[in-house]
Amino acid sequence: MSDSDEETVIERTLKVVVVGDGASGKTSICTRYAQDNFGRQYQQTVGLDFFSKRVMLPGNVQVLLQIWDIGGQSIGGPMLDKYIFGAQGALVCYDVTNGASFENIEDWVNLVKKYTKDQEKPAHLSLVGNKTDLEHRRAVRIEKHSKFAEQHGMSSHYVSAKTGDSVRLMFRQVAADILGIQLSKSDMEADIAVVQAPVATQSEADLKAAASAASKDRRRNHAKKSSVCSLQ
Ligand SMILES: Nc1nc2c(ncn2[C@@H]2O[C@H](COP(=O)(O)OP(=O)(O)OP(=O)(O)O)[C@@H](O)[C@H]2O)c(=O)[nH]1
Ligand SMILES: [Mg+2]
């Protein structure tokens, strides 16, 4: 193979729709992915919003992801079939803290299947549990999620638009799945978002002052007769 063959970039464009109940976090997932941003304020999507992002896959495949973020309220609307038509992938989202949003997933899956059934290739379906940062408020059991994904032949994902956890990885996996490209472990690791925690940095003077206060404290405690029994 010549050098020029190795450098040839194959360009592909994929339409991916993002569906699911209102407030499950679809716009937040898209905003996190395309703009690396997150807003706490809920602003309902009326109709739909568009996002796009390029992703490079193994084999020099450059994908332009066209992401159609469909407002949850569109479910009974006259435009939904047009929004979904031609999608190669569908992210069907629910909120892991909201059982009702999971119960409605089946309706969304059926609609995507119905509106993409005449395509050459049916849309790739992904089940997305969002808001994993609120794990302590989880209302949908992991087994339920896994069983549903398996029954409907969907890929399975858990993300947090708030922290960014697994968002990039999910879009990359979906693009690769649609194109039948295998991602290696290192490909996937490159997309695992490192969740930033603030690190307190202290000056040398602060550290000296803290050490001196601690040592004074120790001396004071030693001199005092303590009535507290500490178990170690
Ligand atoms: N804690 C937490 N909150 C989230 C997360 N994702 C979204 N939210 C919040 O959930 C609310 C709804 O998010 P949206 O992204 O607007 O929901 P949506 O699915 O686009 O809703 P519609 O446009 O009505 O269909 C907002 O207040 C977000 O800040 C998340 O991962 N964690
Ligand atoms: Mg929205």
Image: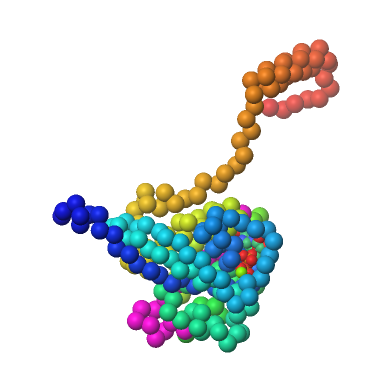
Quarter of the figure with the N terminus = bottom left
Q: Is residue 113 left or right of residue 97?
A: left
Q: Is residue 145 above or below residue 3?
A: below
Q: Where is residue 142? Give x, y as percent.
A: 55, 62
Q: Residue at 47% x, 84% y: name it.
A: 115
Residue 217 lies in quadrant: top right
Q: Residue at 60% x, 42% y: name it.
A: 197
Question: Where ligand 1 lies, by image quadrant?
Answer: bottom right
Q: Residue at 54% x, 63% y: name it.
A: 30
Q: Is residue 196 above or below residue 120?
A: above
Q: Is residue 14 visible?
A: yes
Q: Is residue 228 left or right of residue 160?
A: right
Q: Residue at 47% x, 65% y: name it.
A: 52
Q: Using the image as rendered, state which of residue 15 and residue 115 is in the foreground.
A: 15
Q: Where is residue 143? Give x, y as percent.
A: 53, 64
Quarter of the figure with the C terminus = top right
Q: Is residue 186 left or right of residue 147?
A: left
Q: Where is residue 168? Give x, y as percent.
A: 48, 56
Q: Which residues are magenta?
A: 115-133
